[in-house]
Image: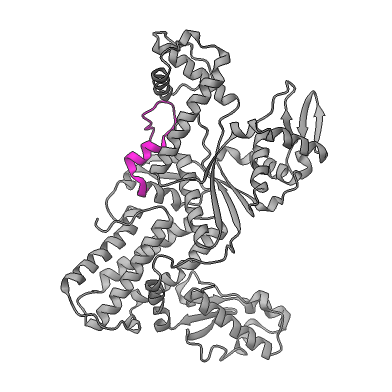
Amino acid sequence: MVLSRLDEARQAIRQRILAKLDALGFRGLDDLVSLEVPTEKERGDLTTSFALKAASRVKLAPRELLARLEGFADGLDSVERVEVAGPGFLNVTLRTAWLAEVVRDILGRPDTYGNATVGQGRRVLLEYVSANPTGPMVIVSGRAAAVGDTLARVMSAVGYQVWREFYVNDAGGQIATLGHALALRLRELDGEEVESTWPEGVYPGAYIKDLARAYRAEHPEVRGESVTAADYPALGAWAAERIRAGHEATLREFRVTFDRWFSERALRASGAPEKILQRLRERGYLVERDGALWFTATRFGDDKDRVMVKSDGSLTYFVPDAAYHADKFDRGFDYVIDLLGPDHHGYVQRIRAVVEALGYPADRLEVLIIQLVRLLRGKELVRMSKRGGTFVALEDLIEEAGIDPARFFLLERAPETPMDFDLNLAKLKGPDNPVYYVQYVGARIHSVLRQWREMKAPEVPVDLALLREPEERELLMLLARFPEVLIRVAEERAPQHLAKFMTELAGAFHAFYRQHRILDQAPELRQARLALAQAVLAVNIRGLSLMGIEQPEVM
């Protein structure tokens, strides 16, 4: 395993601390000694509070314990100084010249810098978006797409084997309802007035009119008045596949692809739901009440038992969902991660319950709730769908805001937090637009590199020890942190940390660029700063790529 420069320093310092403690007769403290990057710059580059935690074990005041560790870092190339602060914090400042070698680390592997092996090849199934094929994809599905795709990219980079899946709910009552809507629009094409008598609960969106025209083009012989309720499921299945294909095209444009589109209809046809019922029955977790079949979910922490088979003999939607999750675990995935919409809070415990009841490890099922997105123009709420209904379609957002701003904005906030998306800000070509601010870093560096090539100045050996200015050091520390940011994103399933890091890196580079010239310098310093700029560019491209965002050379 190749350690990042920061982790290399952390491990070396930790080992020195533990060795010194051991020599003093203080053993068994390994679990307490860890070093973190502090949030306050005055606390150095790495800090540890282990002395506060160890005080009761070693019967020494924290500062007295730290005083006995004096000299533990002597001879470590990475350490410039060690300071004791506050009630018992140990703060470590790294040598700038040592830290600067991160530039060489990056330029030696620009396309893979930040990769790690923490995933240890464990297999992960990420299921996300899974929008119902009954209408255009909405903006909250776009948020799930951006989050799921970024997680898949980052988790793959740090050593997981990731499988991406979209579960298509192309069966059940909603498909018949879709067919009913299509039948009504076919009648409308034949001249019948249908709006005034439109049934409640049947999809009213104008997009159904487009589907009706497409169906008529394929089946000119089918007249609206000849369609009966018995035809609704077949009509709905035809419409659902058209809508699903539209979802796939929209997501592909949004730079999101899947390894598999898993069909609920195919799952039902395989007999998997009935097999799940049999497994639950054999395990003693099904009971009959009032003519219906119930899963005793309360035995696994759910707030109530759940109906699996209604009194009329039909299955509830929960049965194929349970069968689908069984299928996931039966395929041998180490982790099954569901990204679900904001209306699924009550669903989480019941699916955990059935997974455990079926004998799978419930702790290997993770559920992330993707919260709602409000679309604004400044402070005004926007309803901008071109297809009717009350939804905001993802394709409309892409068309107006652009792919890069849409993805960046949708990744900026924690997925479980509701967010506002300001269209005016997304379209702004200036530093107030976060994605423009980040992409402009790369454009600036590309401009500097073009000017350097035009200078045709002779290259000199790169002496990274010349990078001593505070703004340079800030960049070096951020570059060194990048691998750990990726690990945090993957382990916490939290892509917002990458968006935050990219914004911090952009701020640090723009500050450096304003304060210091790169090309108008002595050759040695110019070469060192060019190398630093190239390292920043590599990390900027890599970070944006993991977010599914492009880095333009000119802006």
Closer to the camera, 71 or 168? 168
**Closer-to-camera residue (142/474):** 142
Residue 243 in the image: x percent, y percent? 46, 30
Q: Is residue 245 above or below residue 75?
A: above
> 455 above or below 237?
below
Q: Is residue 169 left or right of residue 286?
A: left
Instruction: Give the residue at x 52% y 58%.
Output: 155
Q: Which residue is located at x 64 percent, y 87 percent?
A: 19
Image x and y of residue 141, in percent: 48, 40
In which quarter of the view is residue 517 placed? bottom left
The residue that appears at 65% across and 51% down in the rendered structure is 332
The boundaries of the magenta stretch are 381-405
Residue 296 in sight from this viewpoint: no
In what quadrant of the picture does the C terminus appear?
A: bottom left
User: Which quadrant would the N terminus be assigned to in this image?
Assistant: bottom right
Task: Tell me if residue 493 is in the magenta stretch.
Answer: no
